[in-house]
Image (cartoon, rainbow, N blue to C red):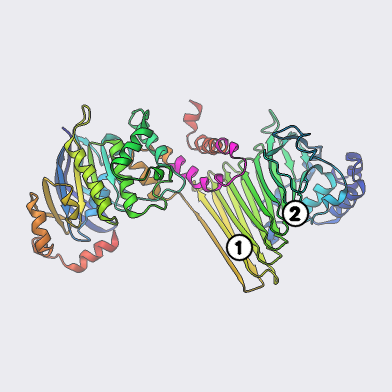
Amino acid sequence: MSTLEIKGLWASVGEKEILKGIDLTVRSGEVHAVMGPNGAGKSTLSGVVMGMPGYDVTAGSVTLDGEDMLSMPTWQRAVAGLHLIMQYPTEVPGVMLDDVLVEALKSRERSSDGLEQLLRDEADRIGFDNQLLQRPLNVDLSGGEKKRNETLQLAVLAPKIAILDELDSGLDIDALRACARRVEAMSNESVGDSEPLGVLAITHYSRLLHELKPDFVHILAQGHIVKSGGPELAVQLETDGYATFAGTAEASAESSSALDDLFSI
Amino acid sequence: MSAFSPDAVREFAQTWLPMRLAAAERFAIAPLPTPGEEIWRYSRIDQLDLDRFSPAECVTDVAMGGSRDSAGALLVEDEPELFANETPDVYAELNRAFMSPTVIRVPAGMTIAEPIIVTHSISGSGTAVFPRLVIDAGPDSEVTVVERFVAAPDTDGDEALVVPVLQVRAQQAARVKYLAVNEVGINTWQVGNQQAVGERDSTTLLATVTLGGDYVRARTEARLSGQGASTKQVALYFAGGTQMHDFRTIQDHDAPNTNSDLLFKGAVQDHAASVYTGLIKIRKHANGTTAFQTNRNLTLSEGAWAESVPNLDIETNEVKCSHASTIGPIDDEQRFYLESRGVRPEVAERLVVLGFFEEVISQLPAGAIADDLRTRVANKLDLVKQPEKALA
């Protein structure tokens, strides 16, 4: 059983506090959805956990199975078992997917024997055109293809915990279904002696959650988790919107500062 | 007496003596260039001390895929008109005086499937060599030539001077692909000139890869002299230590409906420097022309610098023309993306730099050498970035 534990996490961009005390625990096989309006700090949360440049952690801790993630460089966090699916996967001209995966496996002291076949199998499973395996990373891929590519990497690297930053943005409904179902399956199945995947799915809309069934839903607003609950919370959101929950955030929460957050991220 | 005087020419050569002497006489009275001149701006040309060198015959090997006979006796050395190119600077003049020529003439209609490999071994200890490669591709012919500049065995650290000249003529509908690979020694200076003329409906590729040398300059000029001619110029350069790589490019549209494209990509690390200045010149009668020019530079260390200066000189309106130029470090987002997959930082950097160059490498003729080049670029990066590991 693996556990990602985020405790009292505060983080800022420049002078601006974005996260103001986040507590979250994700275990193997659990799917947690973190939902919130634009500017709530969703992308900051994923970026801070993975060590993206540009964020300062001012308080709190992030551990994976007791190991301090915040003191590790990004690549070691990945090797330890964290994986980030980016909202906008970066185009890396001239760098091939399989070259990156070979190096990523090497860092984990895992063999890349059979990688080619595994890539083809996983690509077929999520409807990723095999020809696209020969492209430089994300270059000239559509939104849906990029997210399929991200999901493919997740499946090959098989981390302990996956952080999905808006997996559902910029892709069509078929791609969304294919990616979400693959992640759902990984969260349910143990491969070999490994635990099923723990998932922290960060999303604005609930449509992702129709395929990727959350066990827990957390609402993030103004840098706080203002409410946690079961899947019913996502249903409530769908009818009531975020406004219902915004009031429970700190009194100073105004839409203008939410917009500021958005632009400063 | 200068080592490069007309008298020195008399001692040096028997062939084409009048042409050589005339050139040496012009050189003797011409002022040496300085960085004060625009075309030499940013260069180190004022640090070139010719007195440290003496002329020598260039050691050149020519290899062809098939036997020479089957290729139709392509290598000839004959009439001096062959060498009647323009002389853009005094160093090209000096080449005319002391040249060691190689001539490749491809008869009309002939396609040479295998690349012709011309290798100049530069031996050090103060020698100056003046290789001149002439490629004359007859109408509707096709040829690929790779010209390699390498340090002779065990001379890598010696001082040497290389002053090459390349003349390419692509006659009507000819297809010429040329690649220069520079891997000369670390104390070698190179001051080169490349000139290509594309006649009607011809296609010419001029490619350059520069990894070696102390100061390496190439002035590379593609003139489109016939309607429907196309040229492409590409280059990969990677300077480390205190190296300087210096490129001056010219795309000269001298006929209507001509197309030129240019992609130069470079990287600098440590205290190295690079210069790119490019000119697109579109003459009055060159209507219906397209011309593109892109120069991109990676600065991999704080102490390294790169300069990029694009210029346009357009005398007619009916053209499509663009240029782009960038200088900057490795993209943080690309680095983070790879590291977030668990790729080690130094490996991520290597992948990004190789990826940056891949756009050029994939366009080089003679694909067989591409893998070798990727390795050499990677080694150069690793050697300097991780000296401890390289020694271990």
Q: Which residue is drawn at 75% across and 54% down?
A: B171
Q: Looking at the image, which residue is at 9% across and 50% down?
A: A231
**What residue range appears in magenta?**
B349-372
Q: Are marks 2 and 1 on the same chain?
A: yes
**Disc 2 on helix, strand or loop?**
loop
Residue type (three-letter) at the residue carrying disc 1? Ala
Secondary structure at badge 1 equals strand
Which residue lies under the disc numbered 1? B291
Instruction: Answer few, some or many: residues within 10 Å of disc 2's Cα (few below 14, many 20 plus, some between 14 and 19).
Output: many
Left-right relation of B214 to A175: right
| Quarter of the image where the N terminus of chain A is located | top left
How many discs appear?
2
Disc 1 chain ID: B
Q: Position of residue B54 (x, y in %)?
A: 81, 40
Residue B364 falls within the magenta-colored stretch: yes
User: Is residue A60 something that shows in the picture?
Assistant: no
Q: Nearer the viewer, residue B277 or B291?
A: B291
Q: Position of residue B214 (x, y in %)?
A: 65, 42
